[in-house]
Image: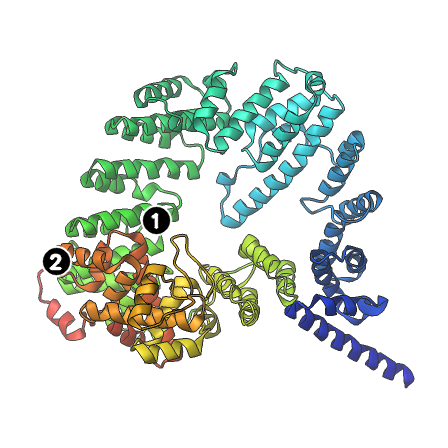
Amino acid sequence: MPLVACTACKAQTSTENQEKLLEILNDSDFDALDELVSPSSFTSTVEPDSCYYTALHLLNNGGTERAIELLQYGKTHASWQIAQECARKLCSLGTTQEREASAKYFAEAYPQERDADFYILEELFNQKKYKEALKACPLPALADFAFPQDEQKAKSETQKKRIKQNLEAQNKKTKYQLLCLLKTKNPKFTEYFTLWVNNWNISEEHESFLKFWEELPQEEKDAAQIVNGQNPETLAELLQFRVTVKQKKYKQALLMLAALPYSPENFTSKVFSDFGRAELYGGVAAKEGASTFRTIAEKTKDPDIAFLAWFYCAQFSVNEKNFDAALNAFVLSMHAAPTPAKYDNALWYYLKTAKTVSLEAAKDALKTYASTWQDPEYFEDFLRDLAADLLQGHYWDDFVEIYKLIQDYADPNSQAQYAYVSGRLIEETMAKNPFEGMGRLQAAQACYEKAYDGNHTALYYRFLSAEQLGIPIEENIEKNSTLQFERDKALETLAIGYAEHALFDEAYKTYMAHYHDIGIECASELSRIFSRAAEKDCTLHYDALSIINRAASRSDATLSKEVLYLLYPRPYLSEVKNAAETFGVNEDVLFGLIRTESYFDKTIASRAGATGLAQLMDATANDIAKKLKIKEFDLKDAQTNVNFGAYYLNNLTGRLDNSIMMALFAYNGGIARVRRWQKAAKDLPVDLFLETIPFLETRDYGRKVLSAAALYGYLYYNKTVHQVVQEIIGTKPQIESNKLNEAQNEGKSG
């Protein structure tokens, strides 16, 4: 009986201390933290995982000795992932002997980790135990080291990320391994150094190695052996050339290359790529560059070099304005492309060059090659810019024709844009109906249905398509994903633990680095924790939204109403409500504007100098203050900033024929520009006017605010998406059943 009572008492104390710990950490009360963790009994009265997170706080505040004790406890008592993090952290703490012991422990306990033997390598190198370091962490066999994994051959984003992480881990080790070989005068140094310089992408570790090399005494450099004709000092100069190219100092790189005893024809593909960039951006004359790379392309037997040589030949030909030669060279580069990613790269430039030549050339290029690209999303920006060029030039028929060319091949977001706009152009009789067997309104409806049903994340076009179709979209906003997703539960536990223990930077970095492996349920919990903490630190609103937005943008994400509330929160509700009532602005629109402008970080400032929740420039704020007869103000004060933003939006709306959408364009791009654009647009409907705006930022701004306002209206204000779209953009459903019945009698050509 006494034993039961004692156990219950201990459990209660543990719970109380755990709660107290989290409260202290979230209050950043480090005096109270020192007092709480001082007793030796602390570790037995909190969850073992908390020892790791508490240790990080102590390290950040000078409590190294106690932090080491907590990490030692967590290393053996915490859950698997947290125990590993404790062991990893200990590798950089304590005395030389303690760090070495920790590094050996980590290597033995976690041999499957990429960095398992890195810490012992680093520690022994720092102790100048070079042979022992190489024994503890040997280099891979030369054959395995010679050809590193290629990210461009990855078949998925997850695989690409893992290859990148493998390369980063190997580079960190290679730097120390090479230095160990060099210090021990091992002839294998030159063999490995040759491969690392010639066959690997340049990393931060290459740059770091170069600094080590430059600081070496000359006698140590001279001791490095020449192997198979490769001189280490010359290799170091080649490495310096490649690092200089990475730093985009192209003219300086060309001068370095001229002093080296190398012929471009004998470069590896990695070095040749850097050579091409240096020539292209270093000031080599266009005609000379095109000739140089054409000659190499025609002679080489190496397919990688052929791809690059034709690619740079094409680039120089573009600079020479010899577009026929450029297009031909890009095609030859595509034919020689060793990977799908490189094929897409050459094709992207081919399409861009064709667009420069003429609209007809761009159409012909898409007709020929749209079906051949490998990654449709790679071409999203090209199609976006092409759409803007076509619509700004009022090439309505050409726009619809290009939609037909790409409708089965483009990325989902591009398909949504092209489909919706094509439907509007056909419906308004601004473009011919090219769809055989369909009347004009039937063709428009088919376009809207494509934009509405597509597997895309472009809410703007989904909402406007629903508006044209007269569909009550509210019942389809939430979606359940049927795609399988393999979560890394250990990583999820780590990220949540960081957030719960007020280590928000670590939680954010962990999520963003590994979001492919973290489910939306975990992202939602992270967003909730960040949002609660944002009541004390408003900058965390931005991170909370960034996390959930990244999670929701995945095609395998389930969008429940709970997720939507996290995506469209209402911080500063009283301030927004007050400003909306005072200045006659809809709350849903004002929330949409603030979310788009600042992600609810009231301290944020843009590079252009805009400040606060509604992102106001000083000159604009000063003008508003005069009109409101306010002598002193602080744009980082939430109520002031929202008031000024609401006043400004209301003022712009009144000056632009009471059009909220036009006011939003002016809020972002300036009223003078909007009036100039209106004059050029010649009374286009507002939704089509948006597509002709020359500034991508302003086009996207209008789309984002409308989409956000529609969700705010739906979630909080008992509005339908239709009502919000009507209020902002003023369009009405055009495709109605009676009109479709009439359309059956229209001619097939429209």
Q: Is residue 352 visible?
A: yes
| Residue positioned 40% across, 71% down in the render | 640
Looking at the picture, tell me which residue is in the foreground, 47 or 339.
47
| Residue positioned 47% across, 63% down in the render | 603
Give residue 380's mark: 1
Pointer 1 with pointer 2, Cβ within 8 A: no
Q: Is residue 312 above or below residue 364?
A: above
Quadrant assignment for the N terminus: bottom right
Residue, far right: 2
Secondary structure of the residue carrying numbered label 2: loop
**Is 680 positioned to the left or the right of 211 in the image?**
left
> How many numbered marks appear?
2
Residue, far bottom: 1
Q: Which residue is mark 2?
A: 682
Q: Is residue 405 visible?
A: no
The structure's colour scheme is rainbow
- In the rendering, at what x and y percent does residue 673 appear? 22, 56
Secondary structure of the residue carrying numbered label 1: helix
Q: Which mark's residue is nearer the viewer, 1 or 2?
A: 2
Looking at the picture, tell me which residue is in the foreground, 10 or 610.
610
Precedes in sequence: disc 1 or disc 2: 1
- In the rendering, at what x and y percent does residue 290 appear? 33, 22
| Residue positioned 34% across, 29% down in the render | 315
Q: Is residue 41 above or below residue 168?
A: below
Image quarter of residue 581: bottom left
